[in-house]
Image (spheres, coloured by chain):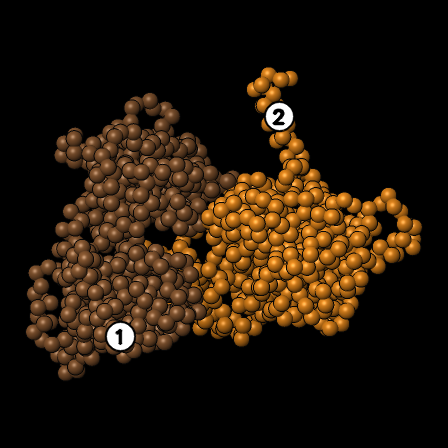
Amino acid sequence: MPALTESNAQKRPADVMADVMEKPPPRSSSTPITPSINPYNAPKTKSAVITSSKTQNAVVFTPELLRVYYDRLFPYEMMYDWLSYGVTKDFFCRREWSFTIQPTPEDEIYIRYQSFKDLPEFKSAVIKRQPNKIDIGAVFTHQPKDHNNLSKEVFHTEERELVFDIDLTDYDGVRTCCSGANICNKCWKYMNMAIKVMDEGLKTDFGFNNMVWFYSGRRGVHCWVCDESARTLSNDARAAVATYFELPLENEEKSLDLTSNLHPMLARSLSVLEPMFLSDIVGDNGMGILTNQEQWVKLLKTLPEEARKAGIAAEMDKEWSKRDISPEEKWKMLKGRIEKETKKEGVKKQRKFKGDENERLEMWPIETVFRHTYPRLDINVSKMQNHLLKSPFCVHPKTGRVCIPMDVKKIDSFDPFNVPTLPQIVSELESYAKENGEAKNVPDWQKTSLKESMQFFLKTFLNPMKNEQRKMRMEEKAKEEAFTGDF
Amino acid sequence: MFTSSKSTSKTPSTSTTNFFYTTPPSYELSLEDFESFALSRLIVLRKIEELKVKGLDRNQYNDALKRVVSLQLPSGGSNQSQKSYNEKRDLASHFILRLAYCRTEELRRWLLTQELALFKFRLEDLEKRGGKDMTLFMRSAQISFDKISHDEKNGMQSELRFNMSYRDFEASSFYKIPFAEAVDLIGRRLVHVRGGYAYVPGGKLVSIICARFRSHLSRSLAKASASFSHVSSDTRIGPLLKNMNKQYTGRDFGKQTAVEGDMNASNVDEYAERSMPLCMRQVHDGLKKDHKLKHDGRRQYGLFLKGAGLTMEESLLFFQNEFTKIMSADDFNKNYAYNIRHSYGKEGKRQSYTAFSSTTIIMGPRSNPSEVGSHHGCPFAHSGDSSLAALLGKMGIGGKDKDDIMAHKKNKMYQLACAKHFEVTHPGAAKTEGVDLDGVGNHPNAWFNSSAQYWKQKDGVKKEGGLKGKLTPPKGKVERALVSPNRPGEEKMEINA
C-alpha cells in the first residue's frame, strides 16, 4: 500500500518520542481500577460474569483479541465518513488523533498529534500500532503531524465537535451504592437522568440536530454534537454553553442559590427529573434516601434553619417512624408541609418568614431534587477546542466493553452490563463462521452483537447527517449556478 | 427603545462620539498631537489596568475611571470646536494605539482588555444617561438587532419573564440574537435560549454590544499586525509606534523630591529588608554576597537609590563600603566612582538620570545568575518558576500568597505579581491612611515610597502603643518628609496635565 510509506506508523522512533507527552491525557487509565460490578445487581448474562480485576484483564482484554477487533471489526469507514463531514479534500488529514500504546505490560505511552491523510493511512496506522485507546482531537489549520515545524501563530485549532463528558465518579457525593470506578444498575440511573436533560437542552435550546451519545466503556457517557454551528464555536462560546447547563454541585455543602424565578431550562429539567427522583432515588430500588430512619435523618438535616424553627424535621421524623409509609409518600408529605409553611396565610396574607428566608425554604425541595439528579458535567472537556476525547468504538482496556452509541429514546433500557465485550464479539465471529462459513459478502460487524449498535449509528446519526450535508451542498450549487447563469 | 437601523436613513448624529471606531480618521495630525493624543490614551488604559487589580467596588472603580477619562480623553464640550477636538483626540488616539499594539499577541491582548473596559464604561454611562443617546450611538456604529414582534413576545411570556417583574417585562422589547453572540448572558443563564437564539431584553444589550466590539477590535488588530512592518518603516512615526508600550506615563523619580524616609549609606540594609521591591532586593542581596555588581545592576540599583533619596555622597559611601571588601579604595575610585557621579549629573554631559520604571526593567537585559555580580532585571519576568518560588519561600511568603504571585507570573502578568508581592508584605495597606498606592507595580520607586509610608504609619501606631518599630527614622527627618510640599499625588497631576 503506497500510503504506508508516508504514514505516521512509519515514523522513526526518535520522531515518535518527540510527540510523546510527559503527562497522560485527562482521565487516562492511570487511575487505580477496581472491577465494576455490584454483585447484587449484576444481571446473569454471560457478559456480566466479570469479577476480579486480575482475572478480568486476562479475560476481557488481550493483545490477540484486540488484533482481531482492529483487523475485522473496528468501523474505520464509518469513522472516516463521519469525521470527513462530506469534505473530501484537505480536511480529514488535519484532524488530531492520539494513541495510547502499551509496548510492554508495564509501559504506557501516549502519542499526540498523529494525523492521517486518508482512510487507508488511518486504518493501517491503527492496525500497526494496536492502540489500547484512541483519542480524537480538533481539526487544526495544518496537519498535526507537522506541528513541530510550525509556529503557534500559524498552527492552531480550527474546529472541533462540541463534546460533553459525564462520569459517575462525579456523583460520589450522593451515590450510596458504589464509589470511584465502580458502577451498578442503581447508580447508572444518574446517566439516564443526565442524558435526558442534556439531550433536550442541546436540541431545544441550542437547536442542535446532529448529536450522538456514547457509552464510554466503563463508568460514564460522552456526547458528540456535530452540527457545523457547534463545530465552529469559539472556546468562549463553548464555555458559555457548558456553564449554561452547570450547577455548582461538586460541593455538597454549598447552596445552589436557586431563586423562585427558575430559568426556563432549569424549570423544564425539574419537570423531567422530579419523577425520576421519586422512582429512582428515594426508594429501595434507588439510593434509598427516604427508606430508613438513618437515611431520612441525614436528609432532614439538610433542611434550612427556618424549617427547624418551624419544627418540620422533628414532626416528619415522628410521623415517618410511626407507621410504614412509602418513600414517595414521605417526599410528598415533606413537600406539602414546606409548602404550607411558605405560603401566605391568614387574613393578612402574611408570610411567616422574611423574603429570602422564605425563599430558601421554598427552594429546598427543588434544590434537593437537583442535588440528587441534575447532570454533573466535566465542563473542562467541553470548554476547549483542543481537548481530546476518547474515540467512539474503542474497547475499554479494563472492562473489555466497546464504546457503543446509545439510543436516547430507549435510554431507560440501556444496560451497561449488556454492552458487548471484546471476547464476546470475537467468539461470536467464530461461531458465525462455524455455522455459516466465511460469508465474505457480509461485513464482519453484522455477524456479532455490535450489529444493532452500528445500524443505529448509521440510521439515526450518520446517514441523516450525510443527507443534510448533501442537501446543503446541492442548494449551494444551485445558488451558485443561478448566480452565474450556468445551467 | 432601540430601533433597527435598517428602517432609518437619517444621517448619523454628531452629538455622540462613535466610540465603536468603525472608520479610521482621515485628517492631518501634527506629530506633536500624534504623540500627545496617544499618551493621553495610554494613561487612561494603564489606569484601567491598575484599577482592576485594586479590588475596588463598582462605584469606586467607575468614579476613579471617570476622573482620569474626563482629564485625559474628555468627550463633548461647551462649543463645537472643543467638541470636535475631543472627538478627534479620542478617535486618533484609539487608532494610533491600535497600530502600536498590534505587533505581538501579548500587546494585542493587553490593548483589547483595556479598550474593552473603556468601551464598557462609556457604554454603560451612555445607557445611564437614557434618552436618545444610546439609539444614536447604535445608529452611528451601525449596530442593529432583530426585535421580536409583540405577538411573539406574548407567546413566550412565561419563559421570557422568568427573571423580570411584570412591569419590566411589559416595558421591554426583546431581541433575537444568535446564541454565540450572547455568550456572557448565556453562561450566566440570564436570558431565555430557544432554537439557537438568545432572547435578550433591551436592558441587557450592553453585554451584546461589548461582545461585538471585542470581536471587531480583535479582528482589526489581527489585520493591522499584517501591515505593521509597512507602517512602522515610516521614519516619523515608526520609532514612536515601536516604543509606545515602553512609554512611561507615571511619576518621574529623577528629582529628589517627594521621597519618603531618610535613606543614608548606613540604613540602606534596613530599607532593603522591608521596603524594596523584589528586583531591587535581589540586586541588594547580590551586592552583599558578591561585593560587586555588573554595570546593568549598578545602574538599575544606583538610580533607584537616588530616586529613593540617597544623596550622591551617601551613594558613593554605600557602594564604596561594599566594593572595597574585595578591592582597594583606589580601584573603586578609579573604576566606579565616576559612574555614580555621572548618574547624579555631576560628570560628562551633566544629565541627571531618572530611575528605571518597571517596564524598562522588564524589557531590559536579563542577568546571568551564574556570573558573579549579575543580579539585575525583574525576578518576576526573568527568573524561572522554581527559582522565583524558592526566592519567595526564602522571604517567608508561602501558601496562597505565593500561589497567587506565581499564578500572575505564569500568566506573564509580572507587574501584577509585583503589586501582589507588595500587598502580601504590607497587609492592610490599601486601608491605611497616608499610604498612596499609586504606581505600585509600575515603578520600583513608587513601590518603595508606598512601603515607606506604610511602615511609617505602622511604626507610628506601634510606638504609641509602647512598641518600638524596627525601623524608625530619626525624628527630625520624619517631619521633613511629612511636611514635604511636593506630595506624590500633586506631582503626578503636574505631569499628567
For the residue labelled by badge 2, is the local secondary structure a helix, a strand or a loop? helix
Q: Tag on residue A487? A: none
Q: Residue under mark 1: which chain is it in?
A: B
Give the side of residue A84 with respect to residue B461, left or right: right
Q: Quadrant of residue B26?
A: top left
Q: Colour of chain B?
A: brown
Q: Residue at x 43, y 36 (%)?
A: B176
Task: Report whether residue A258 is seen.
Answer: yes
- Name the amino acid, label 2: Lys
Q: CA distance from mark 1 to mark 2?
A: 81 Å
Q: Is residue B201 left or right of residue A29?
A: left
Q: Which mark is residue B323?
A: 1
Q: Is residue A31 above or below residue B472?
A: above
Callout 1: SS: helix
Specify the farthest residue to the bottom.
B466
Q: Can you give x and y, in whole percent of width and height, for residue B492 in the image?
A: 17, 54
Q: Position of residue B346 (x, y in %)?
A: 15, 61
User: Quadrant location of the N terminus of chain B?
Assistant: top left
Q: Position of residue A273 (x, y in %)?
A: 55, 55
Do the numbered discs 1 and 2 sit on residues whose CB atoms are within 8 Å?
no
Identify the residue shown where x is 51% and y is 49%: A152
Seen from the viewer's position, the closer of residues A251 and B372 is B372
Q: Where is mark 2, residue-wise?
A: A477
Tag count in the figure?
2
Chain letter tied to orange:
A
What residue appears at the point 70 percent right and 43 percent down from the top-left corner?
A118
Q: Amino acid at mark 1?
A: Phe
